[in-house]
């Protein structure tokens, strides 16, 4: 599907009348979204919806870019901590309830990607050499890049240093530990190739 067709299809989805749909919006949503987006570290487009109990923690040199018509569902936790975090959600990204995004350097989520509930995306983890406390050791940081039009089932984990191609699909509970080519279906712990999308 071309970019123009994708955009048209996404706007058609916005028009659906569904009081329980992900794009529903009331006056509290407008107020809450406005309040959350006031930070000087957040650059944002239009039509964004931020649900209740979203926690966005941003360090002083962070950059958080949110594209048009993104939805961040309830109880999402977004942590942008030093040394130099840069998080990008492109247009029409949906972040499911209870998801955690932890960024110390660079995380990019492509347009139209849907992240199910209770997923986790980290661009870092801890060193754990024996000679010192784990809490005192430096983080190991590698960027995470997720392509356009991907779908992550409930409870997926995306580890540091992963690049995921456009149109990829992941079964619930998948732990993605290596790069994934475009338009493939993966699942499991660790996630493995299941089939190509047709």
Image (cartoon, helix red, strand yellow):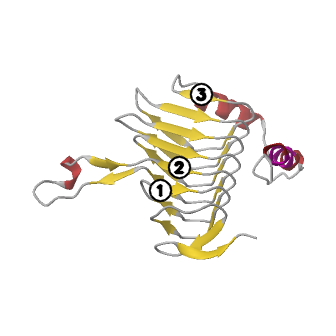
Q: Is residue 12 above or below residue 167?
A: above
Q: Residue at x 58, y 24 (%)?
A: 38
Q: How dense is the environment of label 2, judged by Cα within 10 Å: few (below 14), some, or many (20 and up)?
A: many
Q: Earlier in the sequence, mark 2 or mark 1?
A: 2
Q: Position of residue 4 (x, y in %)?
A: 83, 42
Q: Residue at x 55, y 65 (%)?
A: 155
- Do tag 2 and tag 3 residues touch (Cβ < 8 Å)? no
- Which residue is disc 2 drawn over? 145
Q: Quadrant of residue 84?
A: top left
For the magenta stretch, what is the residue range? Answer: 5-11
Q: How dense is the environment of label 3, judged by Cα within 10 Å: few (below 14), some, or many (20 and up)?
A: some
The CA distance from mark 2 to mark 1 is: 6 Å
Q: Residue at x 48, y 50 (%)?
A: 144
Q: What secondary structure is the magenta-colored segment mainly? A: helix
The CA distance from mark 2 to mark 3 is: 19 Å
Q: Earlier in the sequence, mark 2 or mark 3?
A: 3
Q: Is residue 7 magenta?
A: yes
Q: Position of residue 150 (x, y in %)?
A: 66, 57
Q: Residue at x 44, y 65 (%)?
A: 177
- Do tag 2 and tag 1 residues touch (Cβ < 8 Å)? yes
- Which residue is disc 3 drawn over? 43
Q: Position of residue 140 (x, y in %)?
A: 31, 50
Residue 35 in sight from this viewpoint = yes
Residue 171 in sight from this viewpoint = no
Question: The residue tagged with tag 3: helix, strand or loop?
Answer: strand
Which residue is the extreme one toward the left?
131
Q: Position of residue 89 (x, y in %)?
A: 61, 41
Q: Is residue 19 above or below residue 152?
A: above
- Which residue is disc 1 drawn over? 162
Q: Is residue 76 magenta?
A: no
- Do tag 3 and tag 1 residues touch (Cβ < 8 Å)? no
């Amino acid at each position: 599907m071309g970019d123009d067709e994708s955009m048209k299809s996404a706007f058609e989805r916005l028009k659906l009348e569904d009081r329980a749909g992900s794009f529903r919006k009331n006056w509290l949503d407008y107020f809450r979204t406005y309040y959350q987006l006031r930070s000087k570290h957040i650059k944002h487009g239009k039509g964004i919806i931020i649900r209740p109990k979203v926690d966005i923690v941003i360090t002083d040199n962070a950059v958080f870019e949110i594209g048009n018509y993104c939805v961040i569902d309830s109880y999402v936790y977004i942590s942008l901590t030093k040394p130099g975090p840069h998080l990008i959600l492109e247009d029409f990204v949906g972040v499911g309830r209870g998801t955690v995004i932890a960024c110390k350097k660079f995380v990019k989520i492509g347009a139209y990607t849907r992240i199910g509930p209770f997923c986790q995306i980290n661009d870092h983890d801890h060193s754990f050499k024996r000679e010192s406390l784990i809490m005192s050791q430096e983080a190991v940081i590698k960027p995470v890049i997720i392509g356009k039009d991907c779908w992550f089932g409930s409870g997926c984990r995306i580890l540091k240093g992963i690049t995921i191609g456009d149109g990829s699909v992941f079964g619930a509970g998948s732990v993605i530990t290596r790069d994934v080519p475009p338009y493939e279906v993966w699942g499991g712990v660790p996630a493995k190739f299941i089939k190509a999308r047709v």
